[in-house]
Image (cartoon, helix red, strand yellow):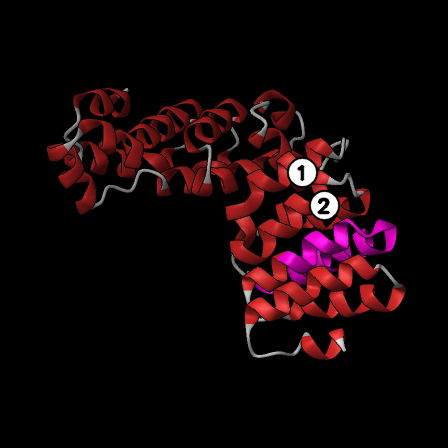
Amino acid sequence: PLAATLKDSDKWVRKTTVKALAKLNTPRAVKTIVAALNDSDGDVFKAAVLSLTQLGENGRQAVAIALDTIVADSWPGTDRILPLIEALASVGERSAIGPLTKILKREDYAPVHYQAVKALQKLEWIPSEDFAGAVYWILTGDFQKCIALGDAALAALIFALRHYSRVEAADALGELADPRAVEALIEALAYSAQDYNLLEDNTVEYFESGGVVRMAAARALGRIGDSRALEPLKTLLQKEREPSVRVEVGK
C-alpha cells in the first residue's frame, strides 16, 4: 500500500510516504525509496536521500550510485546535487569519493566544486596527482601543492581563473610562467561597460567584479613575458580608468 501511495499526486503525501517506508527498513522498502530519487519534486527527493543514508550500507550505497548516475549526465542544478553530496559526507560514505572526484573534473559542475571538496575532506581523501587533485588544492587554498602537479596544475589554474579563486589562480599562473596560460590570462583582462558603471558607483564592487582580477592577470602576463600579451595590455591601458590597475598594467 505504501508503494502505491508513493505515486500520489500530492507531493506532501509522497514525502510522508518516503519517511514511513524508511521506518519499515526492509529490502523492499529500501528499493521503493530508491525509486523516489526520480521524483520530480525536490522535497520528496531530499526526503528519499536522507532516509536512504540512515538505512545502513545498502541505503548509503544507493545514494552514492545515484550521485554517480547524476554526475554522468548534464548539470541537474544545485537542488539535486547538493543534497546527495552533503548526505554522503555526513555519514562518511567512502564509495562517494569516485563520483565526487568526477564532479571536480566537470566544468558544468563548477557551482558545487567547493562543496565536493568539503565532502572529500570529511571522507579523508588523499588527493590524486591529476586535474581533480589540483582543483582540490586550489579550493583548499594550498596553491604550492597545486603548482607542484605540473601540467595538471596548469589546466586546473586556467579553469579556476574562469570560475573561482581568480586572483590567486592568476598569481599562481604567473609563478608557473608557462606560455600556455597566456590566452586565458588575456581573456581575464576583459573590460566591460558594466565595469565602467561600477567604477562610477562603487569602487569596491568594481574591484570585486573584475578590477583586481585584471591587476593579477596583468601581473602574471608580465612575469611570463610573452609578446602576445603586449597589444591586449596596451588596449586595456587605454580603457582602464582605475589608477591602481593602470599602474599594474603599465608595468
Asked if residue 50 is among those painted magenta in the image, a careful observer would answer yes
Q: Marks 2 and 1, how far apart in space?
A: 8 Å
Residue 178 percent coordinates (x, y): 53, 31
User: Which SS does the magenta portion mostly show?
Assistant: helix
Residue at the spot 28% in from the left edge and 39% down from the top edge:
232
Q: Which residues are magenta?
A: 47-74
- Quarter of the rendering occupied by the C terminus: top left
Mark nearer the N terminus (2 vs 1): 2
In the rendered image, which residue does mark 2 sit on?
88
Give the quarter of the image for residue 142: top right
Q: How many marks?
A: 2
Callout 2 touching callout 1 (CB < 8 Å):
yes
Three-letter amino acid code at the position of disc 2: Leu
SS at mark 1 in the image: helix
Residue 118 percent coordinates (x, y): 63, 34
79 vs 28: above or below: above
Comparing 24 with 167, the one in front is: 24
Residue at the spot 64% in from the left edge and 44% down from the top edge:
86
Q: Which mark is residue 119?
A: 1
Give the quarter of the image for residue 243: top left
Q: Is residue 210 left or right of residue 225?
A: left
Comparing 103 with 146, the one in front is: 103
Q: Is residue 97 visible?
A: yes
